[in-house]
Image (cartoon, rainbow, N blue to C red):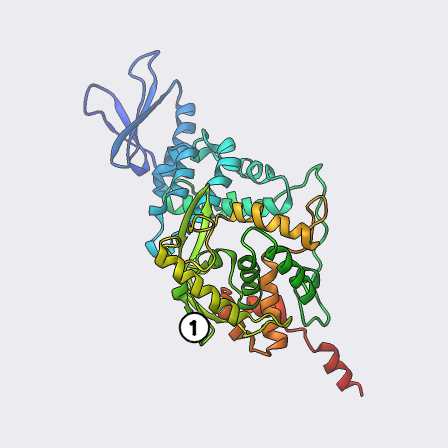
Amino acid sequence: MADVETRAATRGDGEVIELDLGITVYPPRDEGSRWRAVWHEDGERQQCESVSAEKLAARLEKVRRRLATGASNMARPGADLIAWYLNPDRLPVEGRWSRRQADSQRRLCQRFAEPVINVVTCQDITVSHTQRIVNAAPTASEGNRVHRMLSAMVSAGLKGGYLVNPTLAEVHWQAGDRPLPAPKVTVAGESALLVDPCEIPSTSDLVSLGRALAAGSHGERDELMACLAAYSGLRWGELAALTIGQIAEGTRVITVDRKVVEISGQIYREAPKNRKYRRTIYPRRTPAGHPLAERLAARIGEARAEQEAGANPLGLVFPASAGKHWRSSNFNRRVLQPAYRKAGWRDADGNGAWTWHSLRHVFCTTALFAWKLDPTDVSRMAGHANYPITLDTYAGTTAGVLARARAATE
């Protein structure tokens, strides 16, 4: 034991051993007695015993580590670490997770972390435990999600006094006997469009989807919804929350200040993605000749009449049958999937390259290459987190490589 001092016992005969960090060791008073150590931790008096000095010293090593680092929560079980990680109060108000992110992290912890470390003392969590957590993911992409969750949990544990070893997060998904994913291929030559063209429906494909939607239960309203998504850049949740008050008639400007999310069967209305309010615009006509502005103005008039009659109290432009917000699961099952199959977007097994999000790709590529807008303007209207996302995803710095090379070699 390091830094040992002895002094006379305050009660009875004999001496006691004073260690650093305020630990006091009491040797056995008679044959058959146990060695005992006493210290104060987190404002409370703690003690432990052992049959020999060597075994007591081994037990005190963990105590010394907690006292030296001030991480008094290391004696708690892993379940407390998980609860601390998921506790919204550990983050400042402006930095708290969105409902969707909080639900996603809770599910990841419940599925992967809890079975491994729930009953393990935080001080006893090792790299082998965290490796098991990440390896429990079925695929490499899911393993990356679990690793990001684990890395954030370790950081929270270090700050909260539950952990002291940052290398716990230095693990990665291991395939083992599972199939490896195909190597990711990036663009090194010229590519003016880094989004795979197969992810972007053509004008004729959009027309086919529009006709299929128009033949559905809500008729032309669903077709209008798809057209607006394709040429305004609104996400699904933003369209579901769109009200007549957000559309400035005559200017073709939409203020995006809310969205709808469905979490564990519950509907919530909250700020748009990245908590960024923005404004976007839609054209008078689509490339296929669809009179978008005229049709949307007519729909706004219908929605206003529905609101006055009490059938659409929120004034939603695209309400569900009951005049409330659509649930994404219901809309996908009742509207999109039948329309996808009818338009040829899905085969008999339900497989297909395009999704509703592909309509945002239509907007971005149209704005960049047909309307010739600056990428920074497109980024603002699309609601991307930053400009590089727009540049890297759609324009890319590699555009024009061949033209420049050809001009230099003339």
Q: Which residue is under mark 1? A: 249
Q: Quadrant of residue 361?
A: bottom right
Residue 162 x %, y %: 39, 40
**Is the residue 129 above or below the residue 236 in the image?**
above
Residue farthest to the right, as pictured: 410
- Seen at 59% across and 77% down, the residue is 371
Q: Could you say which is closer to the camera, residue 317 or residue 111?
A: 317
- Seen at 69% across and 50% down, the residue is 346
Residue 174 x %, y %: 65, 42
In which quadrant will I find the N terminus? top left
Report the side of 371 relative to 20 (left or right): right
- Seen at 62% across and 70% down, the residue is 365
Which amino acid type is marked by label 1?
A: Glu
In which quadrant will I find the C terminus? bottom right
- Seen at 55% across and 62% down, the residue is 224
Report the side of 23 relative to 264 (left or right): left
**Is the residue 334 above or below the residue 78 in the image?**
below
Residue 26 x %, y %: 29, 24
**Is the residue 309 above or below the residue 363 in the image?**
above
Q: Could you say which is closer to the camera, residue 235 or residue 28?
A: 235
Q: Could you say which is closer to the camera, residue 205 or residue 38?
A: 205
Whether residue 386 appears in this view of the structure is no
Residue farthest to the bottom, as pictured: 410
Whether residue 371 appears in this view of the structure is yes
Count of marks overlaid on the render: 1
